[in-house]
Image (cartoon, rainbow, N blue to C red):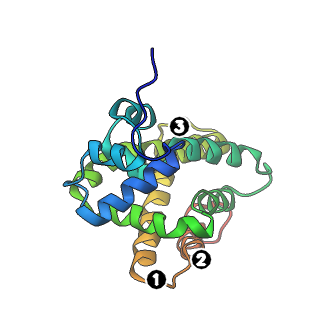
Amino acid sequence: MTTPTRLGRAPSTSQAELSHIALQLFVEHGFDATTIDEIAARAGIGRRTFFRYFPSKNDLPWGDFEQLLDRMRRYLHELPASLPLVEALREAVIEFNRFPVEEVPYHRQRMELLLNVPTLVAHSTLRYASWRQVVAEFAAERLGVPEDSLQPQAIAWTYLAVSLAAYEQWLKHDDADLAELLDSAIRMLETTFDPGSPH
């Protein structure tokens, strides 16, 4: 298959760069009003090349999400087995949501879209399910129960919920620290899910 003719400026060479370009356009024109052709033109690539990076416009705000999930899965399995489940999950969730300083403005834009644009809220269901699966797999392995049983699924759903609650607080305050919010929110769960904690 021949390579499509390159248009405009030097082409985007990564999912992250193309996602950044799209985020800028979404802020300028709105998510629904921005077309794939406009994003491709701004990136200096053809429409066919765009689809090599992302299967749809709805996937753009997520960037390299699948790679981040793979990293989270590896991170969890590299943690010491002696580390309690709740502490392991807290560390992994905070690490998953840690970004370079220069990426923070893009991440704020990304999360504003994902939490508030109806089209993306519906699409996010699939991505959140993939995230929950990583958490449930790890919890099930630690607890010695099937992945689809109640306890790991409840843990996965709850960690997602408190993470989103932390994100909502982060978006409300420009000076908020996301890692601190996540840490504080998840620590509230420790007495709930730690079988060794007093009740």
**Dot 3, how many residues are within 10 Å of its Cα: few (below 14), some (14-19), or many (20+)?**
some
Q: Earlier in the sequence, mark 1 or mark 2?
A: 1
Residue at 38 percent across and 33 percent down: it is 51
Q: Nearer the viewer, residue 128 or 81?
A: 128
Residue at 55 percent across and 48 percent down: it is 135
Residue at 45 percent across and 36 percent down: it is 53
| Image position of 129 with respect to 92: above or below | above
Q: Nearer the viewer, residue 169 or 99?
A: 99
> Given this view, does label 1 or label 2 mark the residue nearer the observer?
1
Q: CA distance from mark 3 to mark 1?
A: 38 Å
Q: CA distance from mark 1 to mark 2?
A: 14 Å
Residue at 27 percent across and 42 percent down: it is 37
Mark 3 is on which residue type?
Glu
Q: CA distance from mark 3 to mark 2?
A: 29 Å
Circle 3: element type: loop
Circle 1: element type: loop
**Dot 2, how many residues are within 10 Å of its Cα: few (below 14), some (14-19), or many (20+)?**
few
Where residue 29 sits: x, y (%)?
24, 62
Where residue 38 sits: x, y (%)?
28, 48
Give the numbered dot on residue 180.
Answer: 2
Q: Where the C terminus falls, by quadrant?
A: bottom right
The quadrant in which residue 59 appears is: top left
Relative to 27, is 8 on the left or the right?
A: right
Where residue 109 sits: x, y (%)?
40, 66
> Given this view, does label 3 or label 1 mark the residue nearer the observer?
1
Residue 114 can be seen, yes or no: no
Q: Where the N terminus falls, by quadrant?
A: top left
Can you identify the residue that label 1 sits on? 174
Seen from this angle, which residue lies furthest front? 8
Q: Nearer the viewer, residue 74 or 35?
A: 35
Give the numbered dot on residue 147.
Answer: 3
The answer to whether the residue labelled 1 contacts the one labelled 2, judged by CB atoms less than 8 Å apart, is no
